[in-house]
Image (cartoon, rainbow, N blue to C red):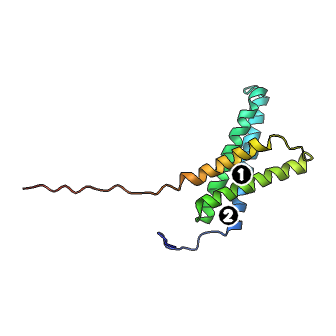
Amino acid sequence: MVMDRKPTGRTSSMAGGLTAGGCVSLTTTLAAVALLAKLVDMERVAWENVGYGIAAALLLSSYLGAITAYGKIRRQRLMVCTAAGAVYFGILLSVTALFFGGQYEAVGVTAALVFGGSTTAGLIGLREQKGRIKKIRFSNR
């Protein structure tokens, strides 16, 4: 395996990074839903538009969790970001089972949003970073 950086020993294990990503995703979700509830309470957002806010919260939470997990692990970007999305989706399913008695609704849409956000985080950084090539101009003097 070719490394373009020196190992510094500052990376986390896979489990530690995915745990950190799951915690960030869950915290972001709670903060976004609390903000959305406050906006509905203040009548700035109509109840019919809450679904759009929830979709945005799921996308943002999965994106930030995947970025955090990769920032801790620092290798295999796409796999780590997808795994972070799977961890977050598992957390959402567990919360539904624990607090709502297993009444699963719109699981497919939720899975698409979560994996869309985490995969986006993985794909954004995959592009190779090529520096500018300076052209040397020769003059015929």
Pointer 2: what residue? 17
At x 16%, y 57%, the residue is 138
Give the vertical position of 57 relative to 49 (above or below).
Answer: below
At x 49%, y 55%, the residue is 127
Q: Relative to the observer, which residue lies in front, 69 or 87?
A: 87
Classify residue 99 as left or right of residue 131. right
Q: Position of residue 87 (x, y in %)?
A: 74, 57
The Cα–Cα distance between marks 1 and 2, rounded to whole angstroms, is 12 Å
**Label whose residue precedes the other's in the sequence (1 or 2):** 2
Residue 25, label in figure: 1
Tell me the element at label 1: helix
Classify residue 73 as left or right of residue 2. right
Classify residue 6 as left or right of residue 139. right
- Tag 1: amino acid: Ser
Q: Residue furthest front?
A: 108
Classify residue 130 as left or right of residue 66. left
- Tag 2: amino acid: Gly
- Within 10 angstroms of label 2, few (less than 14), some, or many (20 or more) residues? many
